[in-house]
Image (spheres, rainbow, N blue to C red):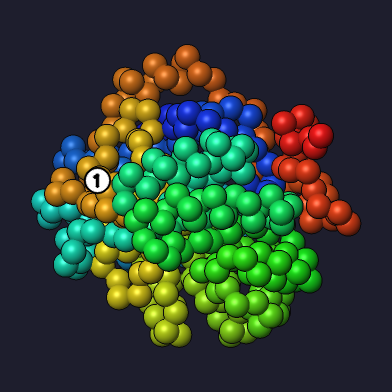
Amino acid sequence: MKVTGYRSLLTKHDWGRLTGDANGVMPEPLTDVHVLILETDEGLEGIGLGAHGDIDRVFGAVEGEDPRAVTALYDRMLAWVFKTGHAGATFGAIGAIDMALWDLKAKVAGEPLWRTLGALDRFVPGYASGLDISLDDDALVALYEGFADRGFGAAKLKGGHDVTHDLRRLVAVRDVLQRNTSHPALMLDANESWNRTQAVRFIEELERTVDLAWIEEPVRRWDAAGLASVRQHIRAAVATGENLTGLEQFRPLLDADAVDIVQVGNVWGITNFLRVAAVAHSYDLPVSPVAYHANPVAHAAAAIPNHLSFEVQHLTAPIGLTIDQEIQDGGIVLGDEPGLGVRVDEKHIEAVRAANPVARLAGPHVRPPRAGLSLVPDLGPVDASGETPARWARA
């Protein structure tokens, strides 16, 4: 079997609401989902998810090769961009190809990927995470009522602008989840919106009322000294790592004793997750994958000894995708379909794309021009124009 080519598709996920974080809110309820289909000379196809605009820089490393040699091909892709670097969009392309290669490897074996990777149990414990910063209190409670119906006893909220606002929301979600557990786990994600002093003051205020399991990305992703300082001054654990593109980027944080929960983005692929998890395990640290559409890394999370909890952002699949998994009992129940268990309806996706052109670039992936630079509490995330939306204005 040899890799012969690829197809790229763009579909949408319909959240039914706006999503965002401290850096901004998406301009519409629909967000893009990039799908990579890796073709072989035997007709079997592998599915990878995630933006892969730089795929032509690395595809030559796998073209004509046996897709079952996944880890060797992963290293070969890294080697192909040794001089120019593999961070950013290139790492995303490598991750999407890697995911598709693992999908093929498990399909050839005729088993789900979690079996191929050596997992014993198909259940992956998780926590609810609604990307919820744009929601008012009633909508927030309604969202997490839905997660509570699926058995979740832990939740991560987006915040970082106004401590009073965030505290009220955390308490509201805690009350919702108490029907499943007497001690819900609560987390807050600031998405790199503070410096170390702001972070400590903000978190200390929250901790007077709520018991935070962790604070996520309190300062910039590369700030090992800042993360270590925050960690030393608060009770909550510090979680970070989802935006690190490469195993070597975790080393400064681990050497500085700057992280309690090692996070890995689903979008960076299976091999990267397995390697980061192994390094974290050598430090006796747990790992927690940050979700992406279809939760592909859940298969790998089921197979490692130090998985803590998997971020579950949504209860439905992107348009045109069918996923062999169930969200129940506070986690992900993986199915028995070979590979990742992702089926693609290409005709449906093409019809959706024609009817819904690509949205303008805005939202939480675009860092605000004055992120973190405010002497008084911000009113809320800015919109695509850089202005604070009217819905955030105070009376």
Q: Is residue 132 visible?
A: yes
The percent coordinates of residue 95 (x first, y second) are: 43, 54
**Image point (28%, 27%), residue name:** 345
| Left or right placement of residue 202 versus residue 298 in this view | right
* Number of numbered discs on residues: 1
Vertical arrangement, residue 345 with respect to residue 79, above or below:
above
The percent coordinates of residue 87 (x first, y second) are: 58, 59
Q: Which residue is mark 1?
A: 325
Vertical arrangement, residue 104 with respect to residue 17, above or below:
below
> Residue 139 is drawn in which quadrant?
top right
**Image point (59%, 50%), residue name:** 169
**Image point (71%, 67%), residue name:** 205
> Residue 300 is drawn in which quadrant?
bottom left
The percent coordinates of residue 168 (x first, y second) are: 63, 51
Vertical arrangement, residue 28 with respect to residue 185, above or below:
above
| Left or right placement of residue 64 versus residue 210 in this view | left
Q: Nearer the viewer, residue 204 or 11?
A: 204
